[in-house]
Image (cartoon, rainbow, N blue to C red):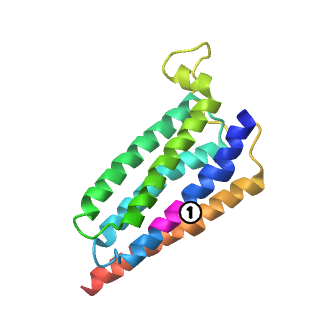
Amino acid sequence: MAQLAQYILMYFVLPLWLAAGFADWLCHRVTRIEVTSGPTESVFHLLGLTEMGVAVLLALFFEINALVIAVMIAAFVLHELTTWLDLRYSVNKREVLPVEQLVHSFMEILPLMGLGFIVLLYWSQFLALFGLGSESARFTLALKQQPLPLSYSLSAVAAAVLFNVIPFIEALLRGLRAQRVR
């Protein structure tokens, strides 16, 4: 069962989440955020991407323990706050189309789903984080003893850079260019 949960994380949750991020960027292109909400909205996007990027990199390369789970929970909470601030700002500047709202729902539920699977897989360290269970909480940062296949990890990072980081930086640059022209 643990192997199945790991495969769901690797081959369903993460790819779908990356696809949702790219779809969000496409929605922003259609609504021309560079001339509506401008670079401020792009900064929110890059901030949210950074917050969740930390959690993903930890999951890919480091042993999951109480420290990593705590950082993942904090990253998720910060991401939700950033999303709220982003939407609070953006809906007053531009129309957020229904398709974009649907994409946003994926971008919010998939990280929660991923966190849920991590907690399920590392239940004893999750409990230990709160002083519960029979295991002591481990607060060390250590590379995985049994790493994920390097080809998978590098492909995941490359996909994130190609389909999320570069597009959202491009959106920021478009916004800055449009702001300078005005």
What residue do we see at 29% from left, 54% from top? 85
Q: Quadrant of the C terminus?
A: bottom left
The residue labelled by disc 1 is 19
* Residue type pointed to by label 1: Ala
- The answer to whether residue 8 is left or right of residue 89 is right
Residue 170 position in % (x across, y down): 46, 75
89, above or below 136, in the image: below
The segment highlighted magenta reads 20-24
Circle 1 sits in a helix, a strand or a loop, which is it? helix
Height in image: 103 above or below 173? above
Residue 18 placement: quadrant: bottom right
The chief SS type of the magenta part is: helix
Query: Counting other residues with Cα less than 10 Å from the Cα at mark 1, is it few (<14), some (14-19), or many (20 or more)?
Result: some
The answer to whether 67 is drawn above or below residue 171 in the figure is: above
Residue 138 visible here: no
Taking the magenta stretch, the answer to whether it contains residue 22 is: yes
Q: In terms of image quadrants, where is residue 98?
A: bottom left
Q: Residue furthest bottom?
A: 181
At x 34%, y 77%, the residue is 34
Quadrant location, the N terminus: top right
What residue sits 56% from the left and 62% below the top? 19
Q: Is residue 160 visible?
A: yes
Q: Residue 166, position in %: x, y?
A: 52, 70
